[in-house]
Amino acid sequence: MTSLDLIALDGPSGAGKSSAAKLIAEALGWAYLDTGAMFRATALAILRAGASLDDEASLRAVLDRLDLGQQGTRVFLDGEDVSEAIRTPEITKFVTPVSQDPRVRKVLLEQQRAVGSKGGFVVDGRDIGTVVFPDAGLKVFLTASVEARARRRFLEQQAKGITMSLEEVAADIARRDHADSTRAEAPLRRADDAVELDSSGLNLDEVVDRIVALWKSRKA
């Protein structure tokens, strides 16, 4: 299989994948593809339409006209910037069943592959190296302890004015870990050829530097 000039960054919720991926892309002069935001925007579209995962007709109507876009780090749904709207606790809870739905995954998988197939992307998610881009030139499984991830997410939400206790954030992360790793459709797991990086004791710059160095060593 031909290696694709693409970095696949997988791992559990709150490990810092998105923050790291954006800076890695910037360091390499590449683009960043936020697949998690695509699922969140789809969840928002379903809620706004009053559709349901249990109602095939209403769900299909949303998926058939799904119009997602990304400009830099901003995410768009039907031309509207929904970068903040997709980060609410309501969407965070609903995105888990949405991301597990094979009908949703099929539609977004096609969109993700169409965008990234030419290379020059850093892509983060749960199954990028195992399912979406198994031919990625570098696969990294970025993880961290539940405690470390909860602290980071708690501070992020405080900065955005979202009120959740540290205990609630930790419980939500643990719930998502279980759901992501046990789902039938493309469960979260480390690809056999992925490099595992535990970021519990690392700051963001250290994570970015290590992954950029890994890529450069692969291409040397």
Image (tube, rainbow, N blue to C red):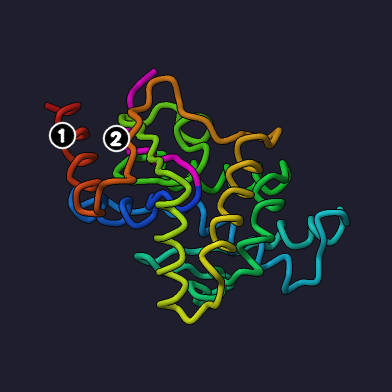
| Kind of element beneath mark 2 | strand
x 76%, y 72%: residue: 49
| Kind of element beneath mark 1 | helix
Percent position (x, y) of residue 58?
84, 61
> Please, what is the three-letter code of the amino acid marked with disc 2?
Asp
Q: Which residue is mark 2?
A: 5
Percent position (x, y) of residue 88?
58, 72
Is 198 left, or right, of 147 in this rendering? left
Are circles 1 and 2 on residues that touch, CB within 8 Å?
A: no
Magenta-drawn segment: 1-12
Residue 126 in the image: above or below residue 51: above
Is 216 left, or right, of 95 in this rendering? left
Q: Quadrant of the N terminus?
A: top left
Q: What separation in Å lies between label 1 and label 2 (alpha carbons)?
A: 11 Å
Nearest to N terminus: mark 1 or mark 2: 2
| Neighbourhood count class around disc 1 (C-alpha, 10 Å): few under 14, some 14–19, many 20 upward | few
